[in-house]
Amino acid sequence: MGVGWILRDGHGLHMESGWARLPQVQSPLEAEAAGFLYVVMHMWSQGWRRIWFEGDNIELTNIVNKQEENIMLGNMVFDIRHWIQKLPLCSLEHVKRERNQAADRLAKYVYESNVSCMYY
């Protein structure tokens, strides 16, 4: 499975984008959570601390924002919350899939490449 992301500044200008191959998981929700966790950790490792995330999975957005528990995600929810707390100004907003098409396309590069990740 793959994850794709696009980082823009407050004016919408591209700052970074990329994709990465991640281990296979059991469900679409786990895939979304694993991808989000990867991107949160990547943003932190790059020194970004004020980030407004957008995702197209309403279930994951609700779990993260409403501090809901999800037995299927188990410790991954704990890990997401741990890394989000390291970002002092961070939010996750749900957007329609149409607004997330570019990141979704980046994630699909996993199937076209033999490398594990790519940053632009």
Image (cartoon, grey):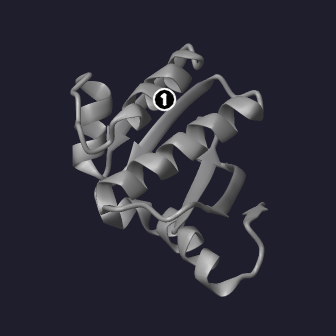
Left or right: 9 in relation to 98: right
Left or right: 18 in relation to 89: right
Q: Which residue is drawn at the image coordinates 58% and 19% (left, top)?
A: 87
Considering only vertical position in the picture, is 12 above or below 4? above
* Residue 9 sits in quarter: top right
Q: In which quarter of the image is the C terminus?
A: bottom right
* Residue 76 sits in quarter: top left
Considering only vertical position in the picture, is 70 above or below 68? below
Q: Which residue is drawn at the image coordinates 51% and 69% (left, top)?
A: 1
What amino acid is at disc 1?
Asp
Q: Which residue is drawn at the image coordinates 32% and 42% (left, top)?
A: 73
In the rendered image, residue 82, in percent from the top left (x then y), is placed at 50, 21
**Which residue in the structure is indicated by mark 1?**
79
Left or right: 35 in relation to 44: left
62 or 7: nearer the eye? 62
Q: Which residue is drawn at the image coordinates 68% and 29% (left, top)?
A: 44
* Residue 108 sits in quarter: bottom right
User: How busy is the neighbourhood of tag 1: few (under 14 within 10 Å), some, or many (20 plus)?
Assistant: some
In the rendered image, residue 86, in percent from the top left (x then y), is placed at 59, 17
